[in-house]
Image: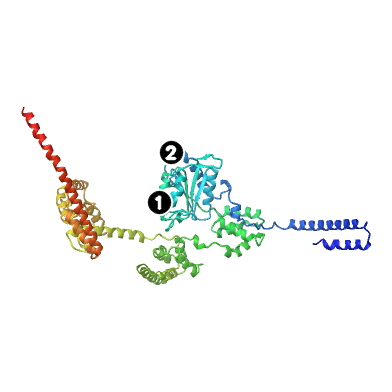
Amino acid sequence: SKLAPTSAPSSSSSSSSSSSSSSPPSSSASSSSASSSSSSSASSSASSSSSAPPAASHDMELWVDKYAPSCKEQLLGNGDVVKKLTEWLSRWNMVHITKQRKVGFSKENPGAKAALLSGPPGIGKSTTAALLAKQGGFEVLELNASDQRSKKSIGAQLQEATQTNAISMSGKINKNRVVIMDEVDGMGGNEDRGGVQELIKLIKASSVPIICICNDRQHAKIRSLAGHCFDLRLRRPHKGQIAKRAVEIARKEGLALEANAAELLAESCGNDIRQVLNCLQMWRQNSTSVNYMDMKQGMQAIEKDSILRMTANDGAKNILDPRGQSLNDRLNGFFIDYNLIPLLIQQNYIGALQSSNQIPGDSKVARMALAAEAMSDCDLVESALRSEQNWSLLPVQAALTVRVGTHARGSCGFPGFPEWFGKNSTTNKKKRLTSELAMHLNSSVSGGLEAVRLNYVPALRDRLMKPMLEQGPDGVDATIAAMDEYGLSRDDLFESLRELQFSNSKDVFATMDSKTKSAFTRKFNQGTHKSQALGGGDVTKKRKRAVESDMGLPGEEDDDAASESDNDEAAAASVFKAKKKKAAPKKKAAAPKKKAAAPKKKA
């Protein structure tokens, strides 16, 4: 269309001259002028294109897929894990099929039939597993979260895959196969019910290696699975490694990326290589160069949510040391783990207040009182939340927790682990021992748990231990007689009563010599004792009635269950008597043989 105005005048001039012989030269002239104009435009466009950067590639292929690693040398970081997984795959058949090689035991369990790759998302766990399997000559069968992975479906899909051989398109049998189970920590709910247990069963009977991949290594389901796997934990690559690869990819796509800008991008994305490439691909659509200031200004639009990379310790530090933190950031820190963070605050707020340089020494006591009051209010709200299941109070608890940090306002290097867990474990253990002891004493004493703990336990310990401490082995009979009187077992004496003694009291069990203790054990094992712990007859019925009285009056269902159990016992007793009656004639039939044998001796 640009050449049309040039050719039009020449054709009109040739037609006005009305000479047929002049028309070919005019057409040739027009073509020469057109070629000259096109060559000049082409040269100008070539000169302009040489100075401009390459145009952005507008294809729909993602850079994450386009520049995916094609060999293990291109994998970023975790070189030790890559090496271990490669060796594990190469020797799998020799260890588990041909039994030609043995693997020593270690904490990571390298002799397992399956491997478990765990680590944060975006670091290449799935890519590493698939790439190493293909380079090792294995056929890859992958199941991820998009597939149904219930107990029934896993058994149907993997049972044949883990116990049969793979056939290639040419008809050749390929004995090397790998099953990759991606996102195993997401197997839950009604759709994937029983999937982890079925996977563990398949691992035990599998004839091919299985690689499991998860993000949350501490998940309850993963703990049971990890005991049957080669435990490999991947870490995020360093920002320098990611920045170097990002600069190379950006240069290939015509984007001039500075190294410090690439490091800033990697750090803001939490060292997630996938998000780094996605951000650069979006940036390339509008620009051909990125420096450090450009990256810093556009950071808010592409930054990965920092709350996703924080732990409960980080949240507690932000609450106790609010310098540089907004109120919204501190409230979000509470919701990282609203079960653990209140305990971390309760454990560390006094130490943070004492180490604060912003609060003068005279006012620290007053601030500590305010922080303790806020901590008490937080505990009251949490008690109401848990007991009444009123979860609308959770924001109130978050505000009160932040209030504790506002009053404390001190530095906290690394929060100490809550001592409440150890105290609570000890308390629950002593409650359990007290309830068991009260149940065993039901046939002889009447009293609740508090009466048993405060009144009966010290008196029983003194009465049972005094004969053996004063008389030695000669006092064992008196101790065992007293134990039978109250229906106590050996565990009640040496475990429950010893564990339930007060901290300021003398440990009388430590003063007893081993000779007396051995004599007690021999004497106690020789006899039969009427104790609930060892299963007495009428005492069991009394204990059953005591349990029913503690739980309330039995309803109709309990009566029906009791009648059914009575009927079952009567039926079992009748069958036992019938067997005895059938067995009795055999003894009577054998008696004449002895009488018949007597005359032979006289003869």
Please tell me whether mark 1 sits on a helix, a strand or a loop: helix
Label 2, secondary structure: give it: loop
The C terminus - image quarter:
top left
The image quadrant of residue 97 is top left
Label of residue 239 in the image: none
Q: How many marks?
A: 2
Q: Amino acid at mark 1?
A: Gln
Residue 221 lies, in percent from the top left, at: 41, 54
**Vertical position of residue 402 compared to residue 581: above or below:** below
**Residue drawn at the location 84% of the way across and 56% of the way down:** 36
Residues at marks 2 and 1, CA–CA distance in whole angstroms? 27 Å
Instruction: Using residue 104 as the reference point, say whether residue 492 is left or right of it.
Output: left
The residue tagged 1 is 197
> From the viewer's perspective, is 35 left or right of 597?
right
Which quarter of the rendered picture does the N terminus lie within? bottom right
Q: Is residue 24 left or right of residue 104?
A: right
On the image, the x and y values in percent for residue 204 come to: 41, 45
Outermost residue toward the left in this view: 602
* Residue 497 in picture, x, y percent from top left: 23, 56
Label 2 crowding class (10 Å Cα cut-off): few <14, some 14-19, many 20+?
few
Disc 2 marks a residue whose amino acid type is Lys
When the figure is inspected, residue 563 is found, relative to residue 78, above or below; the finding is below
Decide if residue 291 is in sight here: no
Q: Do callouts 2 and 1 mark residues in contact (Cβ within 8 Å)?
A: no
Identified at 56% across, 42% down, the residue is: 169
Between 506 and 21, which is closer to the camera in this rendering? 21
Mark 2 or mark 1, earlier in chain: 2
Tell me if 29 is positioned left or right of 441 in this view: right
Q: Circle 2 sits on which residue?
A: 102
Residue 120 place in picture, x, y as percent: 50, 55
Task: Examine the image and state in which quarter residue 344 appears.
Answer: bottom left
Report the front residue among 198 and 135.
Answer: 198
